[in-house]
Amino acid sequence: MGKDTEMTEQGSFSAKDYQDPPPAPLIDPKELGKWSFYRALIAEFIATLLFLYITVLTVIGYKSNKSADPCDGVGILGIAWAFGGMIFVLVYCTAGISGGHINPAVTFGLFLARKVSLIRAVMYMVAQCLGAICGVGLVKAFQNSYYDSNGGGANVLAPGYNKGTGLGAEIIGTFVLVYTVFSATDPKRSARDSHVPVLAPLPIGFAVFMVHLATIPVTGTGINPARSFGAAVIYNKSKAWDDHWIFWVGPFLGAAIAAFYHQFILRAGAIKALGSFRSSSHV
């Protein structure tokens, strides 16, 4: 609907206009001359660094202290909370600066939906990958005696699962995440449900938590190419690279499907475009 209505205190209805923000230009060279653009890159770099530092350190700490007692240490539940909790914190901190992507798959999905330009999307992905490498590098520096012997926090396909299963887990897991990002940040929802206080980072972080619970036993849970790439670069063992393509192809496919589903099915973007074309043809 182009307009929503709401009750005033006197019992009458008032119209509240809503319009989608204009799509981001495909290429916007003007961004390169703005300090806000570089500030956003720094925010993405630091946020991804902190994300990888806390989460991979949690994984290494758990594996180095693992014992026969299943209740000893944080366990898979604690690892999932570390990933989900850090996303909640970091998205909350950086949303107003860079949008709080912290994930090339999220950036890719938003690019496909024309929320960010190509230049911004590419530079965000570079900053995220560099931040991930630096974050895991700090983990290795602080946990050098345990880092290599406990897998370096790298994503690998677990024994007993084939590549198709791993790829499917990454596609579906990333779909859940990116779909949640679109839904939680949808400006139409904010206009329609302004009386409902929704903190967008909360459902996004909770989505990451839930996906980790489901897919840690399968792939260690990537759903973030920067997370997988940073750990693989620093660990740099053959098993970290053998199936590494899964942790790029899967998340990018999942993000693309989520972008299409939200924009063209839930938001009926294709129908709106067709209606606009038909109306203009009759003028």
Image (tube, rainbow, N blue to C red):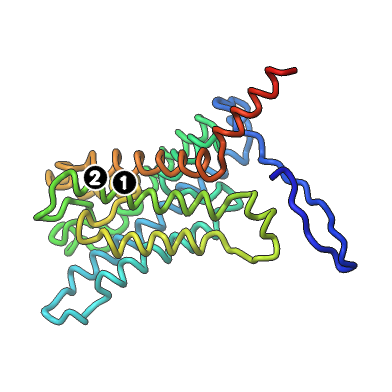
80 on left or right of 278: left
Mark 2: secondary structure: helix
Work out whether 206 lies above or below 4: below
Q: Residue at x 29, y 44 (%)?
A: 229
Q: Residue at x 70, y 21 (%)?
A: 280
Q: Position of residue 25 (x, y in %)?
A: 59, 28
Disc 2 crowd, CA 10 A, few/some/many (<14, 14-19, 20+)? many
Q: Position of residue 182 (x, y in %)?
A: 52, 49
Work out whether 151 lies above or below 130: below
Find residue 51 and report its image quarter: bottom left
Disc 1 crowd, CA 10 A, few/some/many (<14, 14-19, 20+)? many
Find residue 279 and report its image quarter: top right
Q: Residue at x 35, y 48 (%)?
A: 224
The CA distance from mark 2 to mark 1 is 6 Å
Q: Nearer the viewer, residue 82 or 215?
A: 215
- In the picture, the disc for residue 167 is 2
Q: Nearer the viewer, residue 5 or 82?
A: 5
Asked whether the residues under the numbered discs 2 and 1 touch, taking CB atoms below 8 Å apart as contact, a structural biologist would say yes
Work out whether 94 lies above or below 60: above
Amino acid marked by disc 1: Ile
Q: Residue at x 41, y 47 (%)?
A: 103
- In the picture, the disc for residue 171 is 1
Work out whether 228 lies above or below 68: above
